[in-house]
Amino acid sequence: MPKLTPHLRYLAHAQQQTLWLENVSIQQLASQVATPFYCYSKAALLNNIQDCKAAFEPNKIHIHYAMKANSNLSLLRIVAEQGLGVDIVSIGEMRRALSAGFRAQDIVFSGVGKTSAELTAAVLAGVGQFNLESKEELAVLISITDKYQQQVSALIRVNPEVIVDTHKNITTGAKGNKFGVNFNAVLPMLETAQHSAFLKINGLAMHIGSQIHTTAPYLDAIAKIKILIDKLNARGYPLTQLDLGGGFGVHYQNHPQVTSNTECSVPPHLAFNDFANAITSALPDWQGRISVEPGRSLMANIGVMVSEITYVKESQPTSFIVLDAAMNDLMRPALYQATHALIPVQLHSQTEVPSTTQLTNYDVVGPICESTDTFSKSTPLPSNVTAGDLMCFLYTGAYCAVMSNSYNSRPIAAEVLVDDAQAHMIRQAISQDELMEFERHSALNLR
Ligand code: LLP
């Protein structure tokens, strides 16, 4: 049997092969949960966390999970139980982190536009690290710490201006990106902070982008930052903390070969170890603290999105698979031209793997009334897929459910967590009725 992602496999059932996540049949799950829905494997998440810890912790690199990748409370609880810290970008995320069991001191607050209200709430909650992105933000944070007489620890996020080979919408450390400050803005910020009784700047932070497949840009950025730190040390500013951000890439193109009877071959790609070793080798005599903020690499491969085929629309020159899932449920293809492998939940075949199955190329689309609602083009799928069949998008654990919305007045999809043979609803779908509820009092006078 092809092993598709960790813990996802086809098993023989009656006259068919059907897809199972751990020991739960996706077909059976779909008889209880309306499609589309997300479904995650707890074992896959624990595996990822273990791999990540095994790579970074022996190198004394602290891990703060970037919860923007998936902030479902049940998943956060698992991450917190495993002893990781967390990276947040809003007070909504802080509330989730605290409610999931992260300690305030293990929270890093990132983000280019933290409001004064958000900074105040985070200071009062005792958030452990503020990553500052401008001198303007520094001034606001100093005034808050003065007002409440609360000590805070901050890093300055710099923009190391390195070239990262990833989609243009997810680079963050290139010239002109809105994130971080230029190198020459660091010294004046340190001078300002020196006059503060409560705010201490302990180091520098960076995050150069997402879905990065080589260590080279990290090495470039670290080398530049190291030179800056040495200069600042020499001027009497001992900086002892480095936060290197996240960005470690995963392979979405790792299409399982539903047409081949060989074990799905995973193309060689970098593992947590490669990034950990590169970081350590770039900072041989560093005595201070180092941390990283992985998001996608902990979550992407733990989940699938399950959807039902509404129509197989035969047409010329293109035939379409029209799904009941749409770009509101899974935005990555529309926003980043991302491809998530799509596989049938049932293989209509008694043979182990349909190596002889006929394939047809389809454009896979959703029902939303715009052409960006296209998941993939010319996708080879078994020719016998038909309306009513269930399909799974792979690698949809990160930046998928969290980015869903209700465009076209569509409900927000449910999320399910599988743990061995058990399945738990970890977020109910948000129905049209619930969405409309917020609009019922639109006649309310605001004055
Ligand atoms: N730290 C900071 C400050 C970040 O802004 C991010 C991601 C991370 C860490 C985690 O990066 P990761 O390890 O997940 O690559 N929605 C896009 C990805 C946006 C990433 C935003 N920042 C996507 O679906 O590809």
Image (cartoon, rainbow, N blue to C red):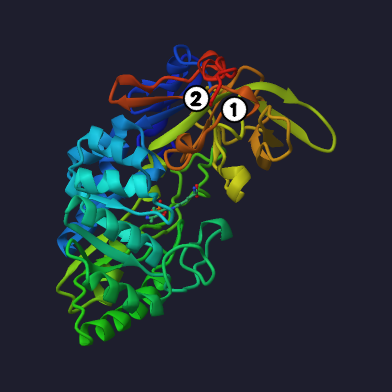
Looking at numbered disc 1 in the image, what kind of residue is underneath it?
Ala
Quadrant of res 238: bottom left
Tell me how far mark 1 sits from mark 2, CA to CA. 9 Å
Between residue 433 and residue 397, name the one nearer to us: 433
The residue that disc 2 covers is: 413
Task: Tell me if mark 2 has few (under 14), some (14-19) or many (20+) residues whose alpha carbon lies within 10 angstroms of its own.
Answer: many
Task: Point out the image quarter for the N terminus.
Answer: top left
Q: Nearer the viewer, mark 1 or mark 2?
A: 2
The furthest residue to the front: 447
Helix, strand or loop status at disc 1 = loop
Task: Tell me if mark 1 has few (under 14), some (14-19) or many (20+) residues whose alpha carbon lies within 10 angstroms of its own.
Answer: many
Q: Contact (CB < 8 A) between labels 1 and 2?
A: yes
The residue that disc 1 covers is: 325
Quadrant of res 26: top left
Residue at 59 percent of width and 20 percent of height: 389
Q: Is residue 35 above or below residue 273?
A: above
Q: Earlier in the sequence, mark 1 or mark 2?
A: 1
How far from the left and from the top, in percent, is residue 65?
30, 48
